[in-house]
Image (cartoon, helix red, strand yellow):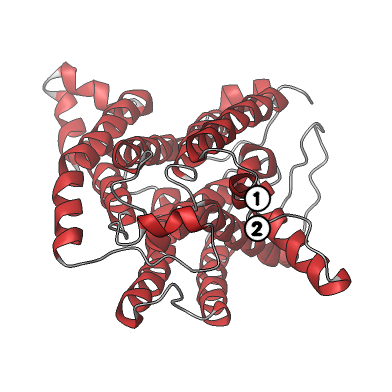
Amino acid sequence: MLYHLLYPLHETYKFFNVFRYITFRTVVAALTSLLISLVVGPYLIRWLTRYHVGQRIRKLGPQDHQKKAGTPTMGGVLIIVSLFVSTILWADLTNRYVWLVLIATLGFGLIGFLDDYLKLIRNRSEGLRPKQKFLFQVLLALIIGLILIVYSNDSMTTRLPLPFFKRAMPDLGWFYLPFAMLVIIGTSNAVNLTDGLDGLAIGPVMISSLVYAIIVYAAGNVKFAGYLQIPYVHGLGELTLVCFSMAGASLGFLWFNTYPASVFMGDIGSLALGGALGTVAVVSKHEILLVLVGGIFVIEAMSVILQVASYKLFGKRLFRMAPIHHHFELKGWAEPKIIVRFWIISIILALMALGTLKLR
């Protein structure tokens, strides 16, 4: 909005020409989302506390978590609002990729809101039934995938670039649609599973969004894309601003979510952020790299899958409890130690992912 209002003034005042540059608007957008989070956060927490929007703790989890019962939840609305306001203010709103990511964020956020709301009114730790939640996610991911394929004139849309290979880009055709849906839904649920300790999920989300900010900036620039030999996607650079806005909003939320948390993001936050990251990975044509960038999310999700499969097939559990962060809790690791070590692993994986951009 401000971009469209201020940039045209550059014809009269040269100073406003600065709004032409994505890099400048990206920095301003990140600071805007961070500021909104820090300013609005205390008011939101007080409002959630006043109306008893507190976390329900499942009885089967680690017993130390029972003391967290009643902590304000659904704080993910703070992240979504900060991201939306910042993006609307500073992004080029004629860019279709910006709107696609915003649709994904809002859509998955609404699914999360419904799940959190049902938990509150039922006064228990379960909201939507798994089949119901999955159905809503499939429908939303289908809409996103169809928009991307049908309304895109780019021949690269249905191709799948493979890391480490310069020209290995098989065209999946319409088979790309279920693949893209799998990436988006899988990422959304993986972030949701990771959100089990104070600040555990928001740290890797912030790191992943910064990595993809670099990726979309490079992929949206003809020269950088050519130098790195990665697929060029026209107009993708504008998502740099969205990714940095997400990082700024996440950093602001972390101020309140760090151990011991004053507020939890709830499913409204974790599903929304995961859906946004998955969508960015799809439109940037770096879907497979998300396995490395979001390695913590993959590990958390795989620990649940392996735990369930092992128990159903062999009657044995691989971990003391899944997701895997609970396994380390039951082994006696302090919660802050688990959180920081997972952040460290996420940073290492992020650096490795960036390194693969030139290894082709």
- Crowd class of label 2 (few under 14; some 14 to 19; many from 20; radius 10 Å): many
Spot occupied by residue 205 in the image (x, y as percentages of width and height): 49, 42
Q: Is residue 56 left or right of residue 340?
A: left
Q: Is residue 156 visible?
A: no
Foreground tag (2 vs 1): 1
Spot occupied by residue 278 in the image (x, y as percentages of width and height): 56, 52
Labelled disc at residue 354: none
Q: Which residue is mark 2?
A: 322
Point out the tag, 2 or 1, that comes first from the N-terminus: 2
Q: Is residue 164 left or right of residue 128?
A: right
**Residue depicted at 16% across the width and 33% down the height:** 6
**Residue depicted at 45% across the width and 37% down the height:** 206
Q: Quadrant of residue 179?
A: bottom right
**Residue depicted at 42% across the width and 62% down the height:** 267
> Amino acid type of disc 1?
His
Q: Eyeballing the image, is 170 above or below 129?
A: above
Tell me if label 2 and label 1 are in contact, CB under 8 Å: yes
Q: Secondary structure at mark 2?
A: loop
Looking at the picture, tell me which residue is in the foreground, 161 or 333: 333
> Amino acid type of disc 2?
Ala
Q: Quadrant of residue 135?
A: bottom right
Q: Eyeballing the image, is 350 above or below 329?
A: above
Q: Which residue is mark 1?
A: 327
- Crowd class of label 1 (few under 14; some 14 to 19; many from 20; radius 10 Å): some
